[in-house]
Image (cartoon, helix red, strand yellow):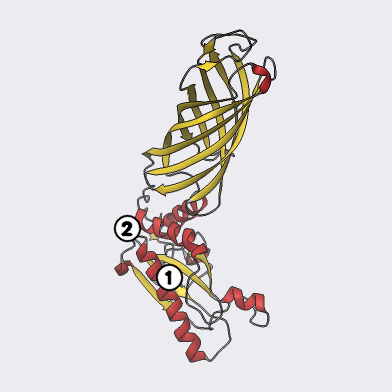
């Protein structure tokens, strides 16, 4: 039963890996504003501010952003015959959606509304509401900080005036979410008869009774799903022909598997590698062993202890697809992982 619960936790971990590991994100910003020509204001002036992001789970958006921007110096009115100036404060709330490009880089879009406040209202520049939308890019410098840059188009509600804001900031996450803990082991409930107590039979000891077990010969120690079959995690690693080198594009998949093992230190990982049918049986056996070993080495680089990992090569013995086509061969040049106690 414990193995079934751990398999459920693994599936949840993979599904929501894209969500932030932190609850909040604070971003000091600096930038500027390019104003529409009919506002009788400086066309370009500097501002700075701060935003606070609330990261969301189970939502079509990734974050709610609350923040403000304030002009750094007095902004001059430019109408002839006046020497007036003002300061401008904008307070805003936005919904943010991120689109990952790589492990460290993502694009994001935002949409929302806010209010702008003028220290000195002149020439139809008045306190009021605005709508805004924008796009930006986020680059993760380290686990503790990311660089953000975006452009935002503001449209005022009262006169329909336009402003273009551009900002650069350093995003600092905080409030790390706790890793989910494995659930406690529950013993199977015996079937009570008038004569004696009969325990449901579990021939292979995987925690699933024979009546419900679709894989009755599960290897000892494997974590299984609710049908009694070993949980296999496809790491989505495919290799070029006659190669055991892992392409950098698979780094995120390997990291997710490593993060799960680190969250549940009592489990062990088994890495199983395969080849297509090209080449001799003996050569493919050695090639699959090299592929499994290279995957173990990649997991070690993410902090998984070598003692918790076991690599096995099966050569061409267990094809996933037909070796009669190029597409089938590509699917067979793969690595799979399983979790055991």
Residue 320, relative to residue 198: is it above or below? below
- Percent across and percent down for residue 26 are 42, 33
Residue 28, relative to residue 9: is it above or below? above
Callout 2: few (<14), some (14-19), or many (20+) C-alpha neighbours within 10 Å?
A: few
The residue singled out by tag 2 in the image is: 265
Image quadrant holding the C terminus, namely bottom left
- Percent across and percent down for residue 289 are 43, 80
Any part of residue 192 in sight: no
The residue singled out by tag 1 in the image is: 295
**Front residue of this view, candidates 234 and 26:** 26
- Percent across and percent down for residue 86 are 52, 13
Which type of secondary structure does the marked residue at label 1 adopt?
Answer: helix
Residue 149, relative to residue 221: is it above or below? above
Give me the residue at 64% from left, 76% from top: 328
* Nearest to N terminus: mark 1 or mark 2: 2
Any part of residue 248 in sight: yes
Mark 1 vs mark 2, foreground winner is 1
**Front residue of this view, candidates 193 and 128:** 128
């Amino acid at each position: 039963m414990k193995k079934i619960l751990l398999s459920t936790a693994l599936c949840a971990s993979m599904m929501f890996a894209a969500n932030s590991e932190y609850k909040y994100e604070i971003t000091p910003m600096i930038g500027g504003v390019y104003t529409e020509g009919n506002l009788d204001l400086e066309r370009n002036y500097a501002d700075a501010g701060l935003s606070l992001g609330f990261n969301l789970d189970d939502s079509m958006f990734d974050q709610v952003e609350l923040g403000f921007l304030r002009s750094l110096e007095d902004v001059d009115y430019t109408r002839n015959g006046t020497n007036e100036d003002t300061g401008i404060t904008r307070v805003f709330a936005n919904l943010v959606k991120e689109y990952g490009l790589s492990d460290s880089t993502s694009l994001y879009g935002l949409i929302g509304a806010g209010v702008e406040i003028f220290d000195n209202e002149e020439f139809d520049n008045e306190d009021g509401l605005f709508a805004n939308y924008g796009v930006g890019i986020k680059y993760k410098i380290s686990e503790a900080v990311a660089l953000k840059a975006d452009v935002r188009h503001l449209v005022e509600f009262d006169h329909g005036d336009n402003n273009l804001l551009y900002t650069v900031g350093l995003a600092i996450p905080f409030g790390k979410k706790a890793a989910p803990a494995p659930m406690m082991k529950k013993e199977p409930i015996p079937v009570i008869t008038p004569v004696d107590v009969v325990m449901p039979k579990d021939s292979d000891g995987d925690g699933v009774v024979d009546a419900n077990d679709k894989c009755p010969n599960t290897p000892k120690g494997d974590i299984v799903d609710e049908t009694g079959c070993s949980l296999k995690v496809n790491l989505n690693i495919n290799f070029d022909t006659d190669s055991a080198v892992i392409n950098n594009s698979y780094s995120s998949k390997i990291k997710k598997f490593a993060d799960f093992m680190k969250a549940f230190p009592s489990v062990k990982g088994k890495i199983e590698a395969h080849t297509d049918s090209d080449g001799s049986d003996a050569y493919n056996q050695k090639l699959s062993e090299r592929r499994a070993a290279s995957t173990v080495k990649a997991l070690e680089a993410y902090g998984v202890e070598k003692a918790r990992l076991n690599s096995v090569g099966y050569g061409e013995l267990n094809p996933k697809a037909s070796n009669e086509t190029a597409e089938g061969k590509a699917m067979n040049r793969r690595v799979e992982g399983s979790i055991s106690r």
